[in-house]
Image (cartoon, rainbow, N blue to C red):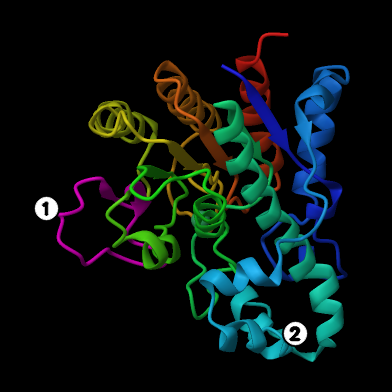
């Protein structure tokens, strides 16, 4: 199966203090890219596509409220979403340039990944994105813009996805995709598989379990064996029920890792790699065009998971 990598060095978030006041490694995207590029001696470049401009205001306005987008001109709003109090005192232009611009580039990356996956029937991995806590009218949990929802809207607008084409979301970040659900949960053409820790933000999913059998709560501290058992038994079932899906999104947050303070699950390093292999295998066995986003991951080794996943994606393409 063909595969593509979507990355630009503009994804990095590098302003003074972020790495001191936030568990997020702002340089993880370029660190991952350098590992991958070195490992394949430049051949990774052949599969690389760069988003060249940030996602447009026009597309943002197609899914987000004008009032919310205007509110981002206030540093206090940005500070609240990032959960870093100190940045409310920074001039907004600096936050736009150093923080929101990289995130808009990452959204453009997911949009490009979706177009690429549909055009080529390939697996397209964005090194960033996966902002599944952004809502139509507010941001939350470090997420400003709903990149997966933007991509779906963009593909529908361009006719790459037809009305009633089926779309799947596999969200294996430790946190439930509450924002993506707010955008797409009631869309009859979008189906969600979400394994999440219900004992951390944003908490237990209250909607009927009967209606959403694949939004699967896990206890804090869930370890490899149980995690991978649930995934291996339920994901193939979910994909078989939706064999006719035109596009699949995989939100591959690595905050399920045992050292991650925010995810609060206990999956080992090798368990995280195994998880990604299981998902890739299930998707490629069914030749499903897919978009991968890297979502959450708040350890200093987060970039290694991104790099390992990208290596597996490269291996799907035969040189
Ligand atoms: Zn997360």
Please tell me which residue is depicted at 68% across the width and 90% down the height of the picture.
76
Looking at the picture, tell me which residue is in the foreground, 297 or 182: 182
Residue 97 image position (x, y, % from top left): 85, 72
Q: Quadrant of the N terminus?
A: top right
N-terminal of the pair, mark 1 or mark 2, is: 2
Residue 61 image position (x, y, % from top left): 59, 74
Position of 214 relative to 96 (above/below): above
Please tell me which residue is depicted at 34% across the width and 36% down the height of the picture.
227
Which residue is tagged 2?
Answer: 86
Check disc 2: other Cα within 10 Å, few if <14, some if 14-19, many if 20+: few
Label 1 CB less than 8 angstroms from ligand 1:
no
Position of 57 relative to 171 (above/below): below
Frontmost of labels 1 and 2 is 1
Q: Quadrant of the C terminus?
A: top right
Indicate the quadrant where residue 37 lies.
Answer: top right
Task: Indicate left or right for 142 with 49 as reference.
Answer: left
Position of 318 relative to 128 (above/below): above
Q: Is residue 89 magenta?
A: no
Task: Indicate left or right for 307 with 173 as reference.
Answer: right
Residue 93 image position (x, y, % from top left): 85, 82
> Mark 1: which secondary structure?
loop
Q: Main secondary structure of the magenta part?
A: loop
Looking at the picture, tell me which residue is in the foreground, 304 or 13: 13
Position of 252 relative to 130 (above/below): above
Magenta residues, start to end: 191-220
Point out which mark residue 210 bears: 1
Please tell me which residue is depicted at 80% across the width and 42% down the height of the picture.
50
Please tell me which residue is depicted at 48% across the width and 72% down the height of the picture.
135
Q: Is residue 299 visible?
A: no
Check disc 1: other Cα within 10 Å, few if <14, some if 14-19, many if 20+: few
Looking at the picture, tell me which residue is in the foreground, 224 or 124: 124
> Mark 2: which secondary structure?
helix
């Amino acid at each position: 199966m063909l595969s593509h990598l979507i990355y630009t060095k503009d994804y990095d978030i590098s302003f003074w203090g972020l790495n001191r006041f936030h568990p997020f490694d702002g340089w993880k995207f370029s660190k991952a890219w350098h590992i991958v590029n070195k490992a394949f001696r430049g051949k990774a470049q052949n599969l690389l596509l760069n988003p060249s401009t940030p996602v447009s205001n026009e597309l943002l306005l197609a899914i987000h409220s004008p009032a919310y987008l205007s509110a981002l001109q206030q540093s206090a709003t940005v500070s609240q979403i990032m959960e870093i109090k100190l940045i409310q005192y920074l001039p907004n232009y600096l936050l736009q340039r150093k923080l929101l611009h990289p995130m808009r580039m990452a959204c453009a990356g997911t949009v490009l990944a979706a177009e690429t996956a549909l055009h080529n029937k390939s697996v397209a991995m964005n090194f960033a994105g996966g902002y599944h806590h952004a809502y139509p009218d507010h941001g939350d949990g470090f997420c400003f813009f709903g990149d997966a929802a933007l991509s779906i809207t963009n593909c529908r607008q361009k006719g790459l996805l037809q009305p009633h084409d089926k779309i799947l979301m596999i969200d294996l970040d430790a946190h439930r995709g509450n924002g993506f659900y707010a955008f797409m949960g009631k869309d009859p053409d979008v189906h969600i598989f979400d394994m999440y820790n219900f004992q951390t933000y944003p908490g237990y999913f209250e909607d009927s379990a009967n209606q959403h059998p694949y939004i699967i709560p896990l206890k804090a501290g869930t370890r490899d064996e149980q995690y991978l058992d649930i995934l291996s038994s339920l994901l193939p079932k979910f994909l078989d029920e939706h064999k006719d899906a035109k596009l699949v999104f995989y939100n591959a947050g690595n905050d399920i890792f045992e050292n991650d303070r925010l995810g609060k699950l206990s999956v080992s390093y090798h368990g995280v790699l195994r998880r990604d292999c299981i998902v890739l295998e299930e998707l490629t066995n069914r030749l499903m065009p897919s978009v991968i986003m890297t979502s959450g991951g708040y350890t200093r080794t987060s970039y290694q998971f991104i790099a390992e996943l990208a290596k597996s994606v490269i291996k799907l393409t035969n040189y």
